Image: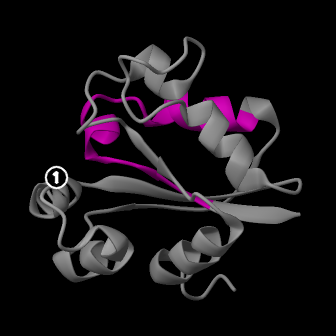
Amino acid sequence: MNRTFVMCKPDAVERGLVGAIVDRFERKGLRLVASELRTIDRTTATKHYAEHEGKGFFESLLVFITRSPSVLLVLQGPADTWQIVRTMMGATNPATAAPGTIRGDLGLETTENLVHGSDSAESAAREIAIFFPGLG
């Protein structure tokens, strides 16, 4: 079984959509291995989004992700669990995300698009280690 990292971002928590999002993953057959409601500190956010450092939107991304609690998840499923999650999330821009995806059905804007999911097995391992270091 493979694991991946998912974050229900502050807008998902603020809008009361975490249950609906987790429900979609569980109905798909993915198993919840770990979860935590946490306000992410700036240091952790900077580490998580390191690949975006230096880009014009980096500071606004940090402000958004640290403004209020997120729900951090580790999901387990078959090979390529990360890819299943990414497909279920839909395109980054909710306006172009397919109906039936999380962002297509529930998202409102690109900068607040409800969820983050690891984009590879390597990213999943790195992100799980950042947010759930004892999970191994």
Question: Is residue 18 depicted above or below 73 in this figure?
Answer: above
Q: Secondary structure at mark 1?
A: helix
The residue at the point 55 percent across, 11 percent down is: 99
Residue in the foreground of this view, choosing between 38 and 113: 113
The residue at the point 57 percent across, 74 percent down is: 128
User: Does residue 112 appear to the left or right of 59 in the view shown?
Assistant: right
User: Does residue 53 appear to the left or right of 31 in the view shown?
Assistant: left
Displayed quadrant of residue 59 = bottom left
Q: How packed is label 1: few (under 14 Cα within 10 Å), some, or many (20 or more)?
A: some
User: Does residue 80 appear to the left or right of 51 in the view shown?
Assistant: right
Displayed quadrant of residue 85 = top right
Q: Give the residue pinned by disc 1.
A: 64
Q: Is residue 10 magenta?
A: yes
Image position, residue 24 (x, y; %)? 64, 29
Range of residues picked out in magenta: 5-26
Residue in the foreground of this view, choosing between 18 and 122: 122
The residue at the point 36 percent across, 29 percent down is: 93
Question: Is residue 136 depicted above or below 4 in this figure?
Answer: below
Quarter of the image containing the N terminus?
bottom right
Numbered label tally: 1
Image position, residue 73 (x, y; %)? 55, 58
Image position, residue 50 (x, y; %)? 33, 76
Indicate the amino acid at tag 1. Phe
The residue at the point 64 percent across, 77 percent down is: 125
Question: Is residue 135 depicted above or below 103 in this figure?
Answer: below
User: Does residue 67 appear to the left or right of 95 in the view shown?
Assistant: left
Question: Is residue 89 depicted above or below 55 in this figure?
Answer: above
Residue in the foreground of this view, choosing between 87 and 30: 87
Q: Main secondary structure of the magenta part?
A: helix
Quarter of the image containing the C terminus?
bottom right
